[in-house]
Amino acid sequence: MKQTSAIIVSAVVLHLLWAGASPGRAQSLAHEGFDYPTNLTLINNTATGYGFTNNWREFVSGNDTAVVTNSLSYTDLNGRGVDVTGNKVQILGGNTGRTMDTNAGGLFGLNGYLDSAGNIGADGETLYASLLFKYVNTNGQYSSPLTLQRDGDADGNMVFQIQTDQQNRLAIYDRVDSIAQLTSGPVDTNTHFIVLKFVFNSGDDSVYGYLDPTNLLAEPTLATASLLGAGDFSFDRISFGDFQGANDPFVDEIRFGGTWSSVIPEPGTWAAMALALLGALGWRARRRS
């Protein structure tokens, strides 16, 4: 009976941990792991993931975004990795995008992220985003592994971008007049992990970019690059593209959440906690029997 009680207690505790002991802002609000069949363009697949509505579609003609087998991976200096699922996509041209879930009953709406216009970016809120990406070639320019857009799919609706510039350096843009470099030199062909922190204000918003954090468990004190008071970053859709040249980037594991940790889940974390807890409770039950 005591052993049964221990198992029941452990199950309850694990359920609470899995559901998120810190509800609301600590949870992941959107995730796209590109778990689709390979050898097809992304827009020919029924979209999965959560935090979005509708399927991926062509925003700008010339799209050729292919689903490629296996995921990208990134490990920090302590050997901790980012959790990955399914496959990845490769952007070979054009611009592909997907609409966010901005319904009042969706995760962004329920957690207070919608502004008066129904876009993600309510004043006073902070939102994190993360993604993995890898450039196949370094001889192109103007390729973007992530773009935020508002009220339309056209180029003029872009409000924020991670993008390579004319010198093929990686930077963050507000799409109007502000730019901050994430790399001092041209991009390479390594896999990179970037976290973005958007701070939405009653005036102009700010964004902080963190390239390849060396410790995934803690938000760095200093950002790699930042745009402060740089405009309205509220958005209702995301996209990525390869506009000029041939960087042909891979993109994987796009996440949005209310905290640093919500967009950087470690692989095996919950499994390790479960085994440790079940083992401890099982030992305690055997000792008392």
Image (cartoon, rainbow, N blue to C red):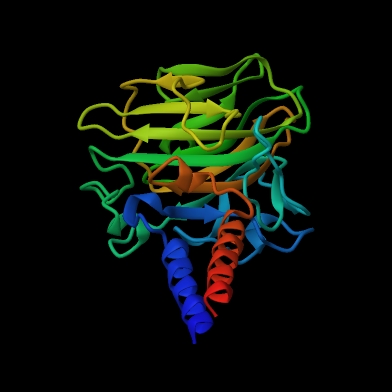
Q: Position of residue 86 (x, y in %)?
A: 69, 58
Q: Position of residue 10 (x, y in %)?
A: 49, 71
Q: Residue at x 37, y 41 (%)?
A: 127
- Residue 133 found in image quarter: top right
Locate residue 89 relative to residue 260 in the image: left or right.
right
Answer above or below: position of 201 versus 47: above
Q: Is residue 154 visible?
A: no
Q: Residue at x 27, y 51 (%)?
A: 118
Q: Residue at x 44, y 32 (%)?
A: 160
Answer above or below: position of 196 versus 53: above
Q: Residue at x 52, y 54 (%)?
A: 31
Q: Position of residue 258 (x, y in %)?
A: 38, 46
Locate residue 27 relative to residue 85 in the image: left or right.
left
- Residue 203 found in image quarter: top left
Which residue is more in the foreground, 69 or 57? Answer: 69
Q: Is residue 241 visible?
A: yes
User: Of all residues shown, which one is farthest toward the bottom?
Assistant: 1
Answer above or below: position of 129 versus 1: above
Q: Position of residue 257 (x, y in %)?
A: 42, 47
Report the quarter where the C terminus lies: bottom right
Locate residue 90 relative to residue 114 in the image: left or right.
right
Which residue is more in the foreground, 190 or 259? Answer: 259
Locate residue 128 relative to residue 142 in the image: left or right.
left
Answer above or below: position of 243 versus 259: above
